[in-house]
Image: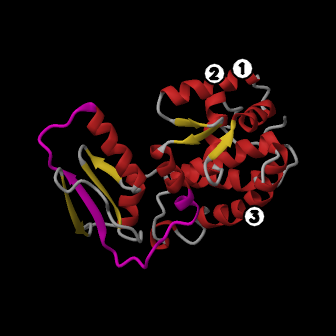
Amino acid sequence: MELPDVPGLRPLTARSVVLSTLLGAYPPRLPARSLVRVGELFGIAEGTIRVALSRMVAAGDLRQDHGDYALTERLVHRQARQDHSRSPATRPWPGDWEIAVVTAASRSPAERTAFRARMAGLRLAEIREGTWLRPANLDRPLDVDRAGCLVLTGRPDGDPAALAATLWDLPAWADHARRLHDALTGTDDLAASFMVSAAVLRHLLADPVLPPELVGADWPGEPLRARYEHFDARFRSVLRTHLDVP
């Protein structure tokens, strides 16, 4: 397997193979034999895949039903976020920012971790402990627990582009996006294509999806999405043939 020249790209673990395959399946459910065949692409033994399946069922990541393995509700939500990241709904930006301030007196470590994951899923960034914000250009509700969080709308006094640059490492995201864009060449190496596909989807989840006014016309988010849609159609067709599924 020849890997594209993308930093951080490496063969997947058994768990990652199972998870990535099911996140890309509709519905997210496949028989064990299909998941074993994907593992074979990476030289992962059947027994190793089956051990990973058992552990993921025990951990609540998967459920087993008549020989098939399916994502549980939490990971179905992750699949929905992943799909949304491929074509996020935006609206014209009037210059306002969403601001969420934690007001709860105390939270358990688990609650803090869950809240951070929720904020990241909503593409907000933390400017200081308990204060999260982003430009109000996403066409979606700011769905947070209003009992422990104050939600406001405001505008910065200074340069909004400078503020965005302090919240996200935009050059790093853009550089990696361009490398992934170049790696989407439609290679016949199914394992390499699988790895690149998974890497693109992870990277799109981390795209802050900022207004063009803050990132410029050469922001690589939309070119990456457009090329990925063409790549994914061919990749999924080849993968379904390999797995012998409709």
Residue position marked by numbered label 3 in the rendering? 230
Is 69 magenta? The answer is no
- Residue 200 placed where, x, y %? 64, 51
Rate crowding at label 2 as few (under 14), some (14 to 19) or many (20 or more) other CA atoms within 10 Å: few
- CA gap, disc 2 and disc 1: 6 Å
At 66% from the left edge and 50% from the top edge, which residue is drawn?
Answer: 25
Q: Which mark's residue is nearer the viewer, 1 or 3?
A: 1
Mark 1 or mark 3: name the one nearer the start of the chain.
1
- Residue 185 placed where, x, y %? 81, 55
Q: Quadrant of residue 71?
A: top right
Residue position marked by numbered label 2 in the rendering? 51
Highlighted range, magenta: 83-109
Disc 2 vs disc 1: Cβ atoms closer than 8 Å? yes
Disc 2 secondary structure class: helix
- Residue type of the residue flagged with mark 3: His
- CA gap, disc 3 and disc 2: 34 Å
Disc 1 secondary structure class: helix
- Residue 108 placed where, x, y %? 22, 33
At 55% from the left edge and 24% from the top edge, which residue is drawn?
Answer: 55
Q: Going by the image, does 164 lie left or right of 198?
A: left
56 versus 235 height, above or below: above
At 49% from the left edge and 42% from the top edge, which residue is drawn?
Answer: 72
Disc 3 secondary structure class: helix
165 versus 69 height, above or below: below
- Residue 89 placed where, x, y %? 48, 70
Rate crowding at label 3 as few (under 14), some (14 to 19) or many (20 or more) other CA atoms within 10 Å: few
Residue position marked by numbered label 1 in the rendering? 47
Mark 3 or mark 2: name the one nearer the start of the chain.
2
189 versus 171 height, above or below: above
Q: Residue at the front extreme?
A: 66
Q: Quadrant of residue 194?
A: top right
